[in-house]
Amino acid sequence: MIVNTAWVYAVTGQINWSFNPNGWRGLQVTASGNEIGSSVIGAAASGDMVLNASGLQRIAAGDVIDMQAGQSSGTTLSTSPFDYGGAMLDVHWVGP
C-alpha cells in the first residue's frame, strides 16, 4: 500500500496460522522498510492462532506500507485456517 498524504497513521497487520506445536510465529509491519510494529510468539500447544502487530507512525507521502510474516515450525503452514481469511493490513489516517 502506498501513502499519498504525509500524516500520522495507525497501522495494523494480522495473520492467521494453522496449528503446529513447533517453532515460533512472527509478524512485522513497516513503512518503507522502517518498523512500525512487530510481534513474535512461540507456537500454541493446541489450535490455530492469530498474530497481530500494530503501531502509530508519521508516514511520508510516497512511503510503502507492508507486512512480513515468518515461522519456524519446520514445515509449510496454512495462513488461512479460518473461514474469514488469512491475512489483513489496515491503515487508518489519525491526523497531522
Image: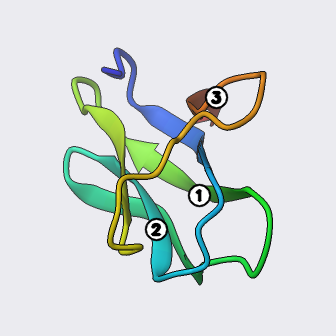
Image quadrant in which the N terminus is located: top left
- SS for callout 3: strand
- SS for callout 2: strand
Viewed as shown, does residue 51 lie left or right of 32?
Answer: right
In space, the residues marked 2 and 3 are separated at their CA atoms by 22 Å
The residue carrying pointer 3 sits among few (fewer than 14), some (14 to 19) or many (20 or more) residues within 10 Å by Cα, namely: few
| Amino acid type, callout 2 | Gly
Q: Which residue is mark 3?
A: 92
How does the figure colour the protein chain or chains? rainbow
Residue 74's image quarter? bottom left
Residue 64's image quarter? top left
Q: Which mark, residue 83?
A: none
> Against 94, is 55 above or below?
below
Considering only order in the chain, which callout, 1 or 3, is on the residue closer to the N terminus? 1
In space, the residues marked 3 and 1 are separated at their CA atoms by 11 Å
Q: Judge by depth and name the residue closer to the eye, 6 or 70.
A: 70
Q: Which residue is mark 1?
A: 55
- Report the residue at 73% width, 56% height from top: 48
Image quadrant in which the C terminus is located: top right
| Amino acid type, callout 3 | His
Residue 92's image quarter? top right
Asked if marks 3 and 1 touch (Cβ < 8 Å), the reply is no
Considering only order in the chain, which callout, 3 or 2, is on the residue closer to the N terminus? 2
The residue carrying pointer 1 sits among few (fewer than 14), some (14 to 19) or many (20 or more) residues within 10 Å by Cα, namely: some
Which label lies toward us, 2 or 3? 2
Q: Which residue is mark 2?
A: 26
Q: Judge by depth and name the residue closer to the eye, 40 or 64.
A: 40
Considering only order in the chain, which callout, 2 or 1, is on the residue closer to the N terminus? 2
| Amino acid type, callout 1 | Gly
In space, the residues marked 1 and 2 are separated at their CA atoms by 16 Å
